[in-house]
Image (tube, rainbow, N blue to C red):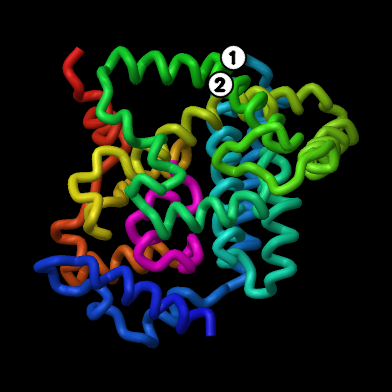
Amino acid sequence: MESETMIAAAANADVTLSGQERWLDKLTRAEIQELVAHRDVMSWLSIAINWGTIFASMALVAAWPNPLTIVLALLLIGTRQLGMAILMHDAAHRALFSNRTINDWVGNWVCAYPIWTDVQPYRPYHLKHHAKNYTAEDPDIGLVRPFPITRPSLRRKIVRDLTGQTGWKRVKATLKRDLGMSQGRQSRTFGGVRNLRGVVISNLVLFLVLLAAGHPMLYLLWAVAWLTTFQLVTRIRAIAEHAMAPDPGDPLRNTRTTVTSWWERALIAPNGVNYHLEHHLLMTVPHYNLPRLHRMLRERGVLDHALIAHGYLSVLREASAKPA
């Protein structure tokens, strides 16, 4: 039933194309049903890889504590925190696990709460983004509207991210959200200290695991990465997905996919986050099927004139191309 709804939604969205062959006609109903089908073992594998990378990064610093291993660990942990956000995002689309109860529970306790987010307030806000993409009612429009900017402006943003200024601003905003003191993009219907339960318990569990391993100070890597590198890769992700779209009314030109190298997938784009155009075309396709959807659309000519970038450096150059 859900796949039928998704096919109908895709067909409705596709009628906005003008003078272009309908992309949906390039996929059969059976192919779409395969693409949106859950393979729970793949989600568990993605979760294991994310947390495994995080703990391996901490173990690296424990074994060889020096500035180089610390910087590498902060980069890897921040990227995998983004990876957890992407898996939470799948859960918001009910695309993480086939069982809805497991989907929301794991999406929150294993993915969202440790990085101080929550499926419940995120889901309606994010679905509105899909429904109103690149319109005045898009709740994410403020993230991409300023671009392109000047190169010095982009450098200042990166410095604020890596020095924790952006992270501290996010701490204050998220705390206000959870306490019911904010009407921001993900405002809650109720506020109170109980909204902090998930982030406090999940982070306490992480700290206790490190304490039991004899390295409680490694928790600082988690906290510092959240304040710094996680903010940077989240910014790069937001820029790459929608900024500088040449045709806001065209679903093939108002959202960007970034073709990545192995090091970009390791340090910037975990869990298929770079296939954002494909995600907007069929939003309940799980993250592990997005590369397949990309290949199918590319081989059938759908992406010949779509918004495709090659590497995040090219996106950042375009984002900072405004004359000083």
Left or right: residue 27 compared with residue 270: left
Q: Position of residue 2 (x, y in %)?
A: 53, 79
Spatial CA distance of label 2 from label 1 is 6 Å
Q: Amino acid at mark 2?
A: Val
**Which of the numbered marks, if any, corresponds to residue 71?**
2
**Residue in front for this viewpoint, 173 or 306:** 173
Q: Quadrant of residue 202?
A: top right
The secondary structure type at the circle numbered 1 is: helix
- Residue that extends furthest to the left in the rendered view of this protein: 19
Q: Which residues lie in the magenta part?
A: 269-288
* Residue under the point 44% across and 38% down: 268
* Whether residue 29 is situated above or below residue 157 in the rendered picture: below
**Which of the numbered marks, if any, corresponds to residue 320?**
none
* Residue under the point 29% across and 30% down: 147
**Residue in front for this viewpoint, 239 or 206:** 239
* Residue under the point 31% across and 47% down: 258
**Residue in front for this viewpoint, 233 or 176:** 176
The secondary structure type at the circle numbered 2 is: helix
Q: Is residue 283 magenta?
A: yes
Mark 2 near mark 1, Cβ–Cβ under 8 Å? yes
Q: If the image is split into quadrants, where does the C terminus sit? A: top left
* Whether residue 259 is situated above or below residue 8 in the rendered picture: above
Residue under circle 1?
A: 67
Q: Position of residue 228 (x, y in %)?
A: 56, 23
Q: Position of residue 140 (x, y in %)?
A: 43, 42
Q: Amino acid at mark 1?
A: Pro
* Whether residue 160 is situated above or below residue 46 in the rendered picture: above
Left or right: residue 124 compared with residue 214: left
What main secondary structure does the magenta stretch of the protein show? loop
Few, some or many residues within 10 Å of mark 1 (<14, 14–19, 20+): few
